[in-house]
Each structure stands twice: as C-alpha cells, then as structure tokens.
Amino acid sequence: MEEIKTRIRQWAHDLGFQEVGFSNLDLTAHEDYLRTWLSNGFHGSMTYMTRNQDLRIHPQELLTGSMSAIAVRMDYLPENGHQRIRSSLKSKHLAYISRYALGRDYHKVIRAKLKRLANQINEHITRENLGPFYSRACTDSAPVLEKHLAERSGLGWIGKNTLLMNRSAGSWFFLGELLTNLPLAQASESPSNHCGSCTACLSVCPTQAIVAPYALDARKCISYLTIENRGTIPKALRSAIGNRIFGCDDCQLVCPWNRYAQASQEIDFQTRHKLDNATLLELFQWSESEFSTKTEGSAIRRTGYEGWLRNIAIALGNAPGSTTIQKSLIAKQPDCSEMVAEHIQWAIHEQADKLSG
C-alpha cells in the first residue's frame, strides 16, 4: 500500500491540498470527551450535534466496509492576512468577517477536490486490477470528528483553542476526509502536543468562550453567536463582539504557531465583493435580494439575512458615536423582524449614550 499512498499524496498536492495523512477509523478514545462536551450543553442550540453520536465515534459506519481515512488540509489565509486582520479589527467602522468566509464556500471547494481525488484513486485501482474501491467525501458536512481523524493522520494536534494546529502551518486551513475501504493505515499513536504553557488563545477570547484548555463553550463563542445562533444574542456579550459580524479569528491571530501560516494560493478562496474592506453602514444597507446575490456560493449564506442584519446592528452599536449611524439604524428598524428590531434598538441606545457623552 505504500506505492498507492505515495500516488495519493502526489494527486492531492496536484489538486491544491498542502498536506495528506492516513488514519484508521478508531476514535473510541474520544468518546468521553464528546459526550461530556454535549452533556455540559456547550453545543448551545446546535441540536444536530446530539444526533448520530455513535457515528461520530465510529465513522466506519458511515461507509460500509470502510477501513481508513485519507485526511487532507488546505490553507485559506489571504495574502498579508495577519496585518489586514489587525487593521480591520482596529477600524471600528469596517465590518470584520472571518477570513474563512471571504471567498467561495469551502464545503463546495474541498468536496469537489476530494471527489476528483477519489476518481483518480478509482481509475488507478481499476487499471491495476487491485480490487474494488469505494469512498465517501466529508468536509464539515457529515457526523465525523474531523479534527480527531486529522490528528490521528499526523496533520497536527488539537490545540487549547480546540482547533487543529500544525507546526509548519499554524491553523489557518480547512480539513477534509475520504473514508475508504483501502487498508491505508495501521493503529497510530496520539501526536505530540506543542501548546506547552501558552494560554494566549484563552486570554484573548473576547467573550471568554474557551472556558478551559481544550474546552470551548459555543454559547459564548462569537462564531457560534453570529453564525449558528438563530435567535437573540445575549446583551451581556454584545459589546465584546465589537465589529465582528460573521465569525471571529482572535484565537488564531494570537497563536504563536500561526507565524508559520502560509498564504493560500487557491483562487476560489480569494476575497469576493471586497468584503475584507467593507464598511458596516454599506453592508447594513443591503436588501435581502442583494444579500442573496452577493453571498451566492459563500459560507456567509448560513447566517441568513436576519442574522446578517442582527450582527451588523450590534457592530453599529459598538461603533464610535455617529449621527449617520443612528439615522441608519432608526430608518431600518420599522422594516425588520421583532428579533432584529430589538438588536437595532439596543444599538440605537448605545449610539445615543455615546453621542450624549
């Protein structure tokens, strides 16, 4: 199997993946962690996390006869990423969107490339008469503990911020897997952890969502609050959100290992509609049809138009006092749902306090 693994690595690199690893499918060692995380309620309203728990622990049940995972990673950090992130976060009139969402939806990009990789493997297996081949592509879309499979595949270790870390690439990358019937991996040992005594990610989290090393309470996480959460954002957390309207990257920005992160060369991940330099007021004026058009093929679609307005309203409330902002909020409020209108009212009050002070 070493020859086919060498070929798979080359095919994957040719498709734009930066690294490839192989793992068996034994994730039973992580069962207690998963069930404890869920029992603590750290998943918030993401009820889908409570379903198919056994599948998450036993991914071989997702594909009958599967024996291995081919794990891949692909960089997504834009050029001059860290510098531009810091600049955006400091400019309170700008909207901050998590770097992973600036380009084309990674689900579409990674899944398409994984299917092409599977086709290449199948062609080789068929040509060499090596037996049947079947696979299933996964990228944050199936009940799979992706980070743990990637960790077992040698792509890195799970850091204190619960992201996969890589000594030569940091954490600014996407993951994907092909579950396959090929016996590509033997039992593997847990990789070395290189977080050491560093707690930078815990300290920097605006909402203190990393409640302990390796433990994230999604209910406090800005990424969850602005993307997965469909309802009201707790008032106690709104000020800490700042100008982040879709996701948060702070725990990656401060991680020392991300000094080694590489800029992405993937065209599909290049920024669309200048969203890395858009003002809050500009985006707040988008109609629902504009939102649908400009987020077509983008991960931003997941928050929905109501979530989009809700998030921007909070960011406008956090912006420096401005009569222009206040007028924009007041003008938008009558046309919004009750949920969005409440967030706008909060922002109006915040702006009024700043203008009167």
Image (tube, rainbow, N blue to C red):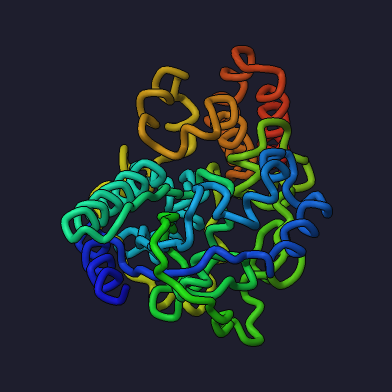
The image position of residue 177, as x and y in percent, is 43, 56
For the image, the number of numbered tags is 0
Where is residue 104 shown, x and y percent of the image? 34, 42
* 311 w.r.t. 330: above or below: below
| Outermost residue, right side | 40
Instruction: Tell me if I can see residue 240 in this picture.
Output: no
Residue 147 lies, with reference to residue 278, above or below; the image says: below
Q: Considering the image in quadrants, where does the C terminus appear? A: top right
Q: Tell me what residue is drawn at x 43 percent, y 25 percent.
A: 291
Which residue is at 53% across, 74% downward?
255
Left or right: residue 262 versus residue 267 is: right
**Quadrant for the N terminus in the image:** bottom left
Name the residue nearer the viewer: 319 or 259. Answer: 259
Q: Which residue shows up at 50% across the image and 79% down it?
A: 256
- Image coordinates for residue 325, horizontal then vertical, percent: 55, 32
Q: Residue at x 70, y 41 (%)?
A: 51
Position of residue 218 in the picture relative to residue 95 (left or right): right
In which quarter of the view is residue 72 placed? bottom left
Q: Is residue 202 visible?
A: yes
